[in-house]
Amino acid sequence: MRSAETTVRNPAGIHARPAALFVRTAARYRSSIVLENLDNPGSRGDAKSMLSVIGTKSKTGNRIRVTADGADEDAAIAGMIAFVDGGCGEAISG
């Protein structure tokens, strides 16, 4: 099991469209992946479920943790963190 933390950088947070892209990115990996919003205690969900991802209420500036468990967990963590750091499919400033 591996995990990494980062900060949501895109202006609107992980709302519907970025959540759909987040889930699509997570689906590329065989490992189970969990998204946790560290700034909203108890907000965690299956990264391969659109409703679970939206349910974390991850907004701009929130710290999140991505945890992966499985055969490709290292690649899953790297890919998911790169996706978030890249703005979740949206333009980011700075």
Image (spheres, rainbow, N blue to C red):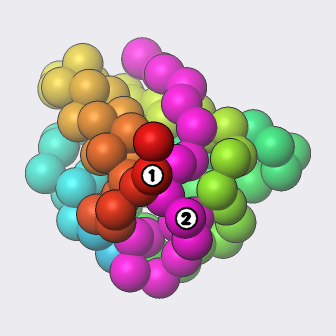
Relative height, residue 54 to residue 22 (above, below): below
Q: Are marks 1 and 2 in contact (CB under 8 Å)?
A: yes
Q: Position of residue 58 (x, y in %)?
A: 65, 58
- The local crowd at label 1, few if under 14, some if 14 to 19, many if 20 or more residues have their Cα within 10 Å, is few
Residues in magenta? 1-19
Q: Position of residue 19 (x, y in %)?
A: 43, 70
Q: Position of residue 7 (x, y in %)?
A: 58, 37
The residue at which mark 2 appears reads as 11
Q: Position of residue 18 (x, y in %)?
A: 39, 70
Front position among marks 1 and 2: 1
Q: CA distance from mark 1 to mark 2?
A: 8 Å
Residue 15 within the segment the image draws in magenta: yes
Q: What residue do we see at 64% from left, 56% from top?
A: 60
* Label ID, residue 93: 1
Of residues 86 and 58, the one nearer the viewer is 86
Of residues 13 and 24, the one nearer the viewer is 13
User: Splitting the image into 4 quarters, where does residue 74 fall?
Assistant: top left
Relative height, residue 83 to residue 73 (above, below): below
Quarter containing the C terminus: top left
Quarter containing the N terminus: top left
Residue 58 within the segment the image draws in magenta: no
Callout 2, which amino acid? Pro
Q: Secondary structure at mark 2?
A: loop
Callout 1, which amino acid? Ser
Of residues 16 and 10, the one nearer the viewer is 10
Which callout, 1 or 2, points at the residue further toward the start of the chain? 2
Q: Secondary structure at mark 1?
A: loop
For residue 71, side relative to residue 33 (left or right)? left
Total labels drawn? 2
Q: What residue do we see at 56% from left, 47% from top?
A: 8
Outermost residue on the right side: it is: 41
Relative height, residue 17 to residue 93 (above, below): below
